Every structure is written in C-alpha cells, then in structure tokens.
Image (cartoon, rainbow, N blue to C red):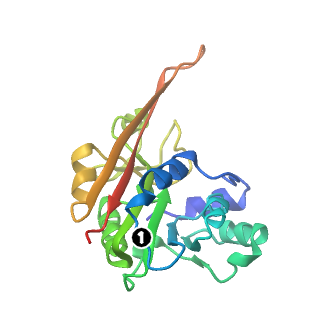
Amino acid sequence: MAINEWEMTYSSGKHANSWPWSDLVSLYFRYCKFLVLQDSYPKVLELGSGTGNNYPFWRSLGADYFGIEFSASAVAISIDRFPELQNRLQTGDFSTLESTSECFDIICDRASVTHCSNLDTQKVILSSLNSLKRGGLYLGVDWFSKNHSDYCTPSTHIDANTRSDFMNGQFVGIGQVHFANREEMLGIFKDFEILELTEKIVTSHYPDKDTHQFASWNIVARKPL
C-alpha cells in the first residue's frame, strides 16, 4: 500500500475531518437489525480510522471501538481529541492486518481499503472475514468505481485497476487508488452474504471546468452464521 502520502497529508493538516460520514450512519441503522449481539453493545474495528471523525457516532451507541490507521499524525490528532482512545488505536498498515479470533461484530471503513492494491484488498477482506463474529457485518463506504472520471486520467498503473501518481483530478498527491466494477466487488466479498451493494454516481457541473463524475460503491456484507 502506498501510504507515505497519507502521513504527509495528515501531518500538514489536510483531511482532518471532524464529522461522521452520513452513509456509514445510514448503513448501520439500516442493517443493525441483522446483528446478533452476544453483549449489549457492538464491538467495532475501523480500518483507516483517520482523525477519529466516525468515533463520536460509535461512541453514541456505546460501542466497544478500536481502530487501525497508518498515519501516526492522524492517530495523534484522534487521541488529542478523544483521550479515551489512547489504547484503542493502532498505528500500522491495515493491508497487512493479521487475522484475529472472531471477536468483532462490525468492521467498517470509509474510503480506506479502496486505496489498497487488488492483492492487498483481498488480504484485508479475508482477514476481516476471519476477525468477524458469525453474523457480523462489514460496512464499506466509498470504494471508488471504474465509472469515476479519474479512472481514465493520466497516472501510473500499479495493477490492472490500481492507479497512483495522478497528474490531475481528485486524487493528486494521495498515493494509490483502486477502482472496482460490480463483478470485482462481488468477487472480493464472495465468502460473505451481500446485503447491499450500491453504486453512487454524482456529476458535478462547473461553469469554467469540465464535467466531473464521482462514482463509488457502498457495501454491506454479512459473515455467514
């Protein structure tokens, strides 16, 4: 995973988001009825926890929350904002996440795993499958789609659908990005029960710029009981 760019981004004060992502909130409330909790509150792991912007949502639910984030600067910001996360955030590359015992009710990410290569993505999802309790949910938000305008912009090809070194567009300076189509998303989550797979396409029109199309996938996948 090309990750030095993310440390540079967070250490320079960029991407220091402070609000939970609405799609993540909506997907949880839509599908939390599928969870069979052994305890009163869900145990949650967030891949690419950033500066902790989703943590207030999970805290409001009383969740037992943990996160893994490559950028030490982002982790430091999170702990400064929420000191109770001191021993709950791990600094590291989640593309090398090792399988743990089946201990999490929910694993989530928002536009994090989509920055892995094809091979690393498969490793992450296999480890996530092994780390979820039976019936646990994977909530993935904003995995970039091949219908995104920037899929075709000048860049370096890491593998068939992973790009880096973007010369223009949304992804300049943030390392590699993987773009998936429907068939690939279904293949990546083939060992799960897929509860929702939605492609969002938003077209932006500017008076002095070319039209730009944002496209990404949201997925809710359940580990079989």
Q: Nearer the viewer, residue 160 or 132?
A: 132
| Furthest residue toward top | 207
Classify 9 as above or below 168: below
Q: Nearer the viewer, residue 224 or 179?
A: 224
Q: Is residue 183 left or right of residue 97?
A: left
Classify 95 as above or below 181: below
The residue at 33%/48% (across/down) is 196
Q: Amino acid at mark 1?
A: Ser
Write down the quadrant of residue 95 in the picture. Answer: bottom left
Query: Which x, y percent locates residue 183?
Result: 21, 47
Query: Which x, y percent locates residue 59?
Result: 65, 66
Q: Is residue 75 left or right of residue 29?
A: right
Give the residue number, with chain letter if any, for mark 1.
95
The residue at 72%/77% (across/down) is 84
The quadrant in which the C terminus is found is bottom left
Element at label 1: helix
Classify 207 as above or below 186: above
The residue at 46%/71% (across/down) is 94
**Res. 54 visible in picture:** yes
The quadrant in which the N terminus is found is bottom left
The residue at 36%/76% (across/down) is 133
Q: Nearer the viewer, residue 53 or 214?
A: 53
Query: Which x, y percent locates residue 181?
Result: 28, 43
Q: Is residue 165 left or right of residue 160?
A: right
Write down the quadrant of residue 53 in the picture. Answer: bottom right
Q: Is residue 115 left or right of residue 160?
A: right
How many numbered marks, from 0 up? 1
Query: Which x, y percent locates residue 154?
Result: 41, 38
- Residue count near mark 1 (Cα–Cα under 10 Å), binned few <14, some 14–19, many ≥20: many
